[in-house]
Image: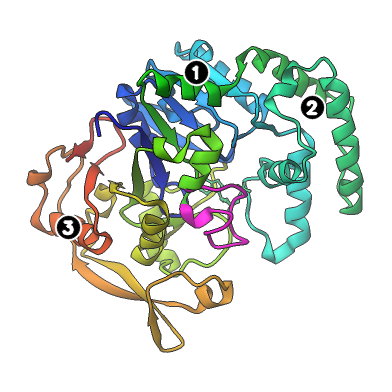
Amino acid sequence: MSERNLVVLGLQWGDEGKGKVIDCLAGTFDAVVRCQGGANAGHTVVVGGHKTVLHLLPSGVLHPGKCLIGAGVVVDPVALVAEIDELAAGGADPSTKLMLSDRCQLVTPAHPALDRAFERAKGKGKVGTTLRGIGPCYADKVARIGLRGADLLDPELPARLRASIRAHNRTLDQYGAKPVDPHGAAVERWLAAARRIAPLVADTAAWIQDLMDKGGRILSEGAQGTMLDIDHGTYPYVTSSSTGVGGVITGAGLNHRQVGLVAGVVKAYTTRVGGGPFPTELDPARAEALRQRGGEFGATTGRPRRCGWLDLVAVRHAVRLNGVEAIALTKLDILDPEPEIPVCVAYELDGKRIDTVPAQLSDLARAKPIYETLPGWNASIRGVSDRSRLPAACEAYIAFIERRLGIPARWIGTGPGREETIVG
Ligand code: IMP
């Protein structure tokens, strides 16, 4: 792997612990690029006991390499400035190493307002979005009416922003929602933030290609997970971007020969936030115990995450779609006290055993997990950094996952810190 590029993707419903994995691996790369999503993501990095939650900035930001926000990302200037300022206040100002794609899309103050209005209108069927305006911003992108990174340098930006907001106010009005004042404080704040980040705008895809020509190496960072992918996830309970390797190619501006090793991040159990079917979801009492132990509360919204056992049908779906060659298995220590650990290896749907994810949500909602139950290890593995020192039952759990997926676990998380990792 040492001479190859690397892609790190989530293989479940997001929140797999990608932030820590990327932070651990970023040190040897010339640059890290965020490829899709926006401030809906919450990537937690713990260094020297200090916790940093990143939303838009790549999780490699705490390393010396360049940090790129690619064309596939939807960027809220206010959120980005807040994040830059927070890091700068902690003594790690990222501005000098940060580049913002001239082709990324801009989240305007109208987008979160639309997100809220659409969610409210859906009532019980709401997606449970992060309300960061992600879906409406991507909708503008494909409708070809969005504002982009390059527009931050356009002297007409204030007028174009206000025109865009006025157009969206007509939709907000139809939904009975409060309009956004095109001359209000939120818009002024947005324009001030836009001015701050304008100097960061660059042709990041051309920069990446130049780096490739010089033999440099890049780490591409996925946000969310394959089960939240707009095409291959549990639609419509998904996010609005391509969270797999396809999103890396388009979102960073890499060509297919430059992707490199695709590593998938898998949490040792499953969580999801928001609505939608979740076959291995635990009953409320057991879910609560896992949630408390694993600190399973949204890094962006603080919402409690739904918790369940590992679903290898979903993970295998993601491994095959993305050509994953190795996994990072995270938060294994959270399972320490479990007496036994069920792992879902197939679903039963209408009396038939299936090992793929049905497209029809009502089918997925009816699918019953078929479990193989493994013994727990009933010991603390917190901080273990040598695989041969794991209890036998814990090693057997890892080996079971590797066998079922047909790929190795090259990184295993035994605690939140950088050093609490087994590298194999
Ligand atoms: P949106 O991306 O805010 O539109 O939300 C759509 C769905 O994706 C909701 O179920 C969110 O909870 C989920 N989601 C978005 N970003 C993340 C993330 O970073 N981790 C986990 N779930 C996410």
Amino acid type at circle 2 is Ala
Secondary structure state at the residue bearing disc 1: helix
Q: Position of residue 282 (x, y in %)?
A: 41, 67
Estimate the spatial distance between the alpha carbons at disc 2 and disc 3, rounded to whole Å. Answer: 52 Å
> Which residue position holds label 3?
399
Location of residue 33 in the rendering, given as x and y in whole percent from the top left corner? 47, 29
Q: Position of residue 277 (x, y in %)?
A: 53, 67
Does the beta carbon of the residue at mark 2 sit less than 8 Å from ligand 1?
no
Q: Is residue 390 in view?
A: yes
Task: Name which of mark 3 and mark 1 comes first in the sequence.
Answer: 1
Residues in magenta?
226-244
The earlier-in-sequence mark between 1 and 2 is: 1
Quadrant where the C terminus is found in the figure: top left
Name the residue rendered at 71%, 34% in the picture: 107
**Where is mark 1, residue-wise?**
87
Q: Secondary structure at mark 3?
A: helix
Question: Disc 2 designates what residue?
Answer: 186
